[in-house]
Image: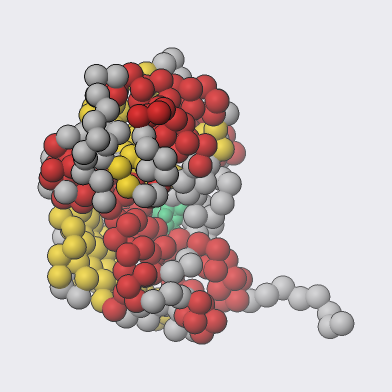
Amino acid sequence: MSKIHELSPELTNQIAAGEVIERPASVVKELCENSLDAGSTRIRIDFIDAGLKQVTVQDNGSGIAKDQIDLAFTRHATSKIATERDLFNISTLGFRGEALASIAAVSHVEVVTSSDNLGGVRAVFSGSEKKLQEDAASPKGTKISVSDLFFNTPARLKYLRSERTEILKIVDIVNRLALGHPDVAFTLTNNGKVLLKTNGRNDLRQDIANIYGRQLAEKMDVLKNSSPDFKITGLISDPNTTRSNRNFISLLLNGRYIKNYRLTQAIIAGYGSKLRPRRYPIAVVKIELDPLLVDVNVHPTKQEVRLSKEQELERLLTTSISEALEKTPQIESGLDN
Ligand code: ADP
Ligand code: MG
């Protein structure tokens, strides 16, 4: 066996990137989450060739100061937490300081940003190396373009699915982020064609109409309930408007889109016998709770979380849904498809 040695920063970044950046949709998710954390009210996402040629995310958020660009692209460097206590009290979507370093390790990145309206900066990174930084005109906010994703990791490129599947994954994550943040105006385009446009006027029903269709959105019931620990809000379909899988149930925990089988089942359980077998509702359910009750630091992608009062939340979800549906009679015909 050869001697033990430390890996180069380039190599460790590439290894770490594998955990956070699985596919073009991961780039979109990480960049949009950064835009949301930066307090943006407008986020525009453009991609070309399923995101492999290019993904650009432009926001009107806080921007990055000139002298912070290098740090923004350094692994485990973040402006979002500082102490161990902060780690258990996360109120931002990001906190691991990994995304930009990971993205830059496996692509070419251009960032144009300004933290005020006075002067901006443009920087170019490629395979973890900074190639250029210069002054550049920029409105307040940040525009990050990621090109030739996985150009230096051919195995990852091969693992990707069809162009169509990768596009659907991008659309899915932007839809969920938009549903989680109706106060932010999202625009998504593919090769210049608009796939989604939300107005940012805090109108969830309107956003659901844009994403799932007007007729469906208009029929959805309002969900609103709370307990000392949780506040639940959202819109849910009636038991006759269903789909054949659970993918139309979006769970947003303190603004973070998460995947959680048990909470999803608790929502379905609220429909009880009103649902036909193997049919699932369309629902956007937002849960607000003290960040101290959630551990987000479970997986690098942060889509999985651990909750310290999960059973209490499951029960609250089930009863809130069944109460919201109480007035809905069971009828045979519906909007099923
Ligand atoms: P994290 O989000 O976990 O902090 P990232 O690698 O995603 O790590 O980003 C590193 C840092 O760069 C962030 O903490 C933030 O300060 C800054 N940053 C990244 N994207 C933006 C953006 N769109 N607007 C303002 N600041 C940003
Ligand atoms: Mg981030």
Closest to the observer, 277 or 284 = 277
User: Residue at (29%, 19%) from the top-left corner?
Assistant: 326
Ligand 1 lies in which image quarter?
A: bottom left
Q: Locate residue 230, reporting x and y percent.
A: 42, 23
The x and y percentages for residue 318 are 43, 25
Q: Horizontal and vertical percent for residue 267?
A: 41, 32
Furthest-top residue in view? 228
Name the residue rendered at 29%, 56% in the picture. 174
At a point 21% along the width and 44% down the height, the residue shown is 335
Left or right: 7, with 243 as reference point: right
Displayed quadrant of residue 333: top left
Q: How many labels does the image show?
A: 0
> Residue at left 39%, top 58%?
30
Q: Can you say which quadrant of the picture contains the N terminus?
A: bottom right
Instruction: Using the image as rendered, state which of residue 91 and residue 309 is in the foreground.
Output: 309
Q: Can residue 321 be seen in this view?
A: yes
Q: Position of residue 200 (x, y in %)?
A: 16, 44
Image height of 259 relative to 150, above or below: above
- Asked if 315 appears above or below 86 in the picture, the reply is above
User: Which coloring applies here?
Assistant: secondary structure
